[in-house]
Image (spheres, coloured by chain):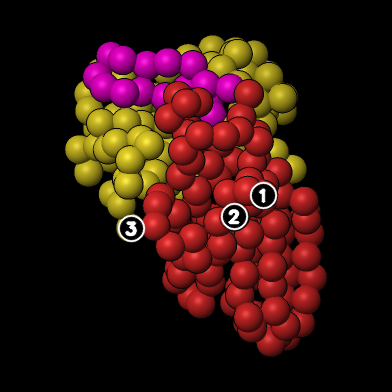
Chain colours: A yellow, B red
Amino acid sequence: DAGITQSPRHKVTETGTPVTLRCHQTENHRYMYWYRQDPGHGLRLIHYSYGVKDTDKGEVSDGYSVSRSKTEDFLLTLESATSSQTSVYFCAITNQPGSTDTQYFGPGTRLTVL
Amino acid sequence: AQSVSQHNHHVILSEAASLELGCNYSYGGTVNLFWYVQYPGQHLQLLLKYFSGDPLVKGIKGFEAEFIKSKFSFNLRKPSVQWSDTAEYFCAVISKAAGNKLTFGGGTRVLVKP
């Protein structure tokens, strides 16, 4: 398995509170991604990063921000959590999207917003 | 926008039965195609992938998939399933024309009864 860890693995929080999820990789891959997984929707891209300090929005970016100050860490922040953000969040990494490279996924973070 | 459709949301079958899961995508051009599997409580793992060459791709655990360009399809098959194949299966597509972002289908939950 690729060296990807996510923290925390589980979190319960209240509406309106800020939440930060961390993805850490030891593979030195350039690209990192945050997805959310919801029943019937598969995985949907929230934000991604193509290098340190280089990020862009995905399909469902509203209510989320990201930061990447180091190659190995990609943070996802919910500035003010809402119940609609209850989901399982997965981080993924790859070196070259669109080539023969594959995205590798972390173990996931289950977030519940009450 | 690119989209990926998995028509079966739930499949229930008995051990030794054959499995076929459908996947269709909506856009043309060169595509890379993937099937990922998520066992209960685990993260996504790559089952197989197609980039070019032989349209019949063999993956891990006895799975295979066939890319039919004219039908925009990439169906997953296994001739004889086992109880341990109980999982959720996701088709995913990446296209340079669509910004090299991985787009997932909604997933198919497969339950194999012993």
Name the residue: 50% across, 51% down. B34
Residue under label 1: B71
Tell which tag, 3 or 2, sits nearer the viewer.
2
Q: Could you give the CA–CA distance between mark 2 and mark 1, rounded to whole angstroms?
A: 6 Å
Chain to which mark 1 belongs: B
Q: Which residue is mark 2?
A: B68
Quarter of the view holding residue A16: top right
Q: Residue at x 46, y 44 (%)?
A: B32
Question: Are there few (<14), some (14-19), or many (20+) residues within 10 Å of tag 2?
Answer: few
Residue under numbered circle 3: A1
Does A52 lie within the magenta span? yes
Classified by dominant secondary structure, the portion drawn in magenta counts as strand
- A33 within the magenta span: no
Left or right? Give the position of B52 relative to A40.
left
The amino acid on which the numbered mark 2 sits, given as a three-letter code, is Ile
Q: Chain of mark 3?
A: A
